[in-house]
Amino acid sequence: MRETAIGFVTLNSPPLNILTRNVLAVVRRELAALAREPALRVVVLRAEGRHFSAGASVEEHLPPACDALIGEFGETVLALRDFPLPVIAAVRGRCLGGGFELVQAADLVLAADDAVFGQPEIGLGVLPPAACALLPALVGRPLAAELIFTGASLTAAEAQAAGIVRRVVPGAELDDAVDGLARRIARHSGAALRLAKRALGQADGAPGAQPAVGVGRAGRIYLDELMKTEDALEGLRAFLEKREPHWSDR
């Protein structure tokens, strides 16, 4: 779904928005469609009902379905992480297991004050593959290890303190807070947002990352790609000419 420059991907199988293979396929399909929209600037990942998601289908974790589920779940996480424009996750209620892993792939997370985040897979004798790869870069290895090894949960406030959540608001204010953030992003150049997203990926905070390498790569994106766009020149000239810029739809 798309409204002007803001696109929406909505988990819609309440009350717990269990992530079956069918639900994951819808998410990937909607992301692919949104990626083709030239006027798009930002995507909001949200959910119907009181809870974001209680996780992936336990039934589909069993053989023989598990082979397809794990592969398709990984594809969905990567589709979110690698989406060419900013992705905001709007979270309320339970955000557990696979639901939490989807959120870890977003660029920005806003949460209602009743949100709860956790990776309870260890209690079922399994592990969260995407979280094992993504969570250490978000919160550091020690906290990631504690969450994955114990299955413990974080409140919204704790998740904000850990760096997972950007902002916590009362539940009744979540939609307005997400809308305000999305609109602030959507007013900017699509070309600049796309390239800023790529440049951010050059130094993702992973253990062992080399900042000098990331800075160099981001600099090349700036010079080799950004400065060849109409929007970069338009934005700089508009500033010097003391006028509002007029962005292209590219």
Image (cartoon, rainbow, N blue to C red):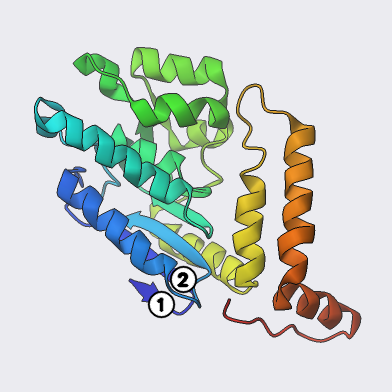
- Tag 1: residue type? Glu
Q: Which residue is drawn at 53% across and 69% down?
A: 41
Is 92 displayed left or right of 137 in the figure? Answer: left
Task: Please tell me in which quadrant of the rendered image residue 114 appears.
Answer: top left
Position of residue 23 in the picture relative to residue 231 (left or right): left
**What residue lies at 23% left-to-right and 57% top-to-bottom?**
26
Is residue 150 positioned above or below 113 on the image?
above
- Residue at the far right in the pictured view: 240
**Quarter of the image where the N terminus is located:** bottom left
**Between 64 and 111, the one nearer to me in the picture:** 64
Give the residue type that dot 2 points to.
Ile
Q: Mark 1 points at which residue?
A: 3
Give yes or no for contact between labels 1 and 2 (Cβ–Cβ under 8 Å).
yes
Query: Left of 176 or right of it: where is 237?
Result: right
Identify the image quadrant of residue 75.
top left
Residue 201 lies, in percent from the top left, at 61, 44
Image coordinates of residue 104 in percent, x first then y, are 45, 39
| Mark 1 vs mark 2, CA separation in Å | 5 Å
- Give the x, y percent position of residue 84: 52, 58
Q: Report the residue marked by disc 2.
A: 6
Q: Circle 1 sits in a helix, a strand or a loop, which is it? A: strand
Q: Quadrant of the C terminus?
A: bottom right
